Amino acid sequence: MQPCSLLSLATAVPPHVVEQSYAKEAARRAWGGKPALFDRLSGVFDNAGIATRHLVTPADWYEQPHGWRDRNAVYLEAAQDLFERVAASAIEKAELRPDEIDGVVSVSTTGIATPSLEARVGPKLGLRPDVRRVPLFGLGCAGGIGGLATASRLASAEPGSNWLFVTVETCSISIRLDSDDPAAIVATALFGDGAAAAVVRSGSHCIARITGAAEKLWPGTQRIMGWDVEDPGLAVVFDRAIPPFIDDNLAPAVDEMLAKLARSRGDIDRFCCHPGGVKVIDAIESALQLPQGELNLEREVLHDYGNMSAPTVMFVLERLIERGLPRNVMMTAFGPGFTCAGLMLEAA
């Protein structure tokens, strides 16, 4: 991939805020018929490192039964609103007009939209009728990096073109209070909603240069992370083995990706990682032999927003830019597959 410039970055969250203490008590009420299951796992609310989360509906909505149709209707309304807000902000920060955007890469895995989100929102946003559209589904938490990398490759292939990347996830609508699966309780303690957007272009240099991207997929790991589609809606797949798997496998995967980009870990001034959970952050620091607490911004974002899936790593990058982007940064995120996505940034 030829180097590509990151012109802007924007984030957005929905209006409803829930504190973790409220979420725990609401979940306890909802699982009232299964007290042994909840009591066995309720510590995840206290140990998640999360204080608040932003949700697309008022908190009491989650205590009522909802089918797939109702859940997806909430997704469509909320995702379109978040898409429009965050895309408009990213375009404005890039000092462009909406009609100067040549292509859009959209990433979302928490609902179904056909036509896709950018087709629904594009006319209202002011995008041209001939804008190129690349909707991506199924990337999960790795979608923030995978989508940004895709937009960068497309911009690099057509010098002078402006590409908008948008990721919107409404993880909370998949919260299931009818399930006996322990992963459902973990999801209730972790998931929040949010969106992020960026504008990239080859040639010009603004916030940073995107100099390369790579991925690592481990065969035979499909049940580590993902969704099961069930009659009431999406059911999260979380394997308890995620942190130890990262601890055992991340370092060689990062070294392999960096080698493809003609780099090594010694060249990296700062890793910028998707904070999937406290134990995941700890495992990343352990695997990469980082000083304990090195991923402080990841912990801050998790504390303030929870796990928003794909947009979350962009929230971390936003804080990193605000505090001074180090010279060489490697972004990483894990997603269904099981996959690790990586992207290299070079500060302006």
Image (cartoon, rainbow, N blue to C red):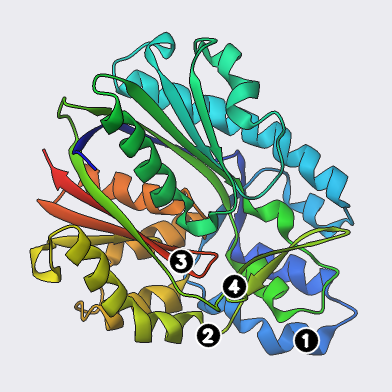
Report whether 342 appears left or right of 336.
left
Question: For the residue marked with disc 1, what is the amino acid?
Answer: Leu
Residue 241 got which mark? Answer: 2
The earlier-in-sequence mark between 2 and 1 is 1
Q: Secondary structure at mark 1?
A: helix
Q: Which residue is mark 4?
A: 222
Q: Quadrant of the C terminus?
A: top left
Indicate the position of residue 25 as horizontal and vertical percent values: 72, 70
The earlier-in-sequence mark between 3 and 4 is 4
Counting other residues with Cα less than 10 Å from the Cα at mark 3, is it few (<14), some (14-19), or many (20 or more)? many
Q: Nearer the viewer, mark 2 or mark 4?
A: 4
Question: For the residue marked with disc 2, what is the amino acid?
Answer: Ala
> Vertical placement of 246 versus 313: above or below?
below
> Vertical placement of 163 versus 53: above or below?
above
The earlier-in-sequence mark between 2 and 4 is 4
Q: Nearer the viewer, mark 2 or mark 3?
A: 3
Corner quadrant of residue 73:
top right
Counting other residues with Cα less than 10 Å from the Cα at mark 2, is it few (<14), some (14-19), or many (20 or more)? few
Q: Which residue is mark 1?
A: 37
* Label 3, label 1: how far apart the Cα atoms are: 30 Å
* Label 2, label 4: how far apart the Cα atoms are: 13 Å
Residue 339 got which mark? Answer: 3
Q: What residue lies at 19% left-to-right and 35% top-to-bottom?
A: 207
Report whether 314 appears left or right of 35.
left
Indicate the position of residue 306 as horizontal and vertical percent values: 51, 59
Report whether 126 appears left or right of 180.
left
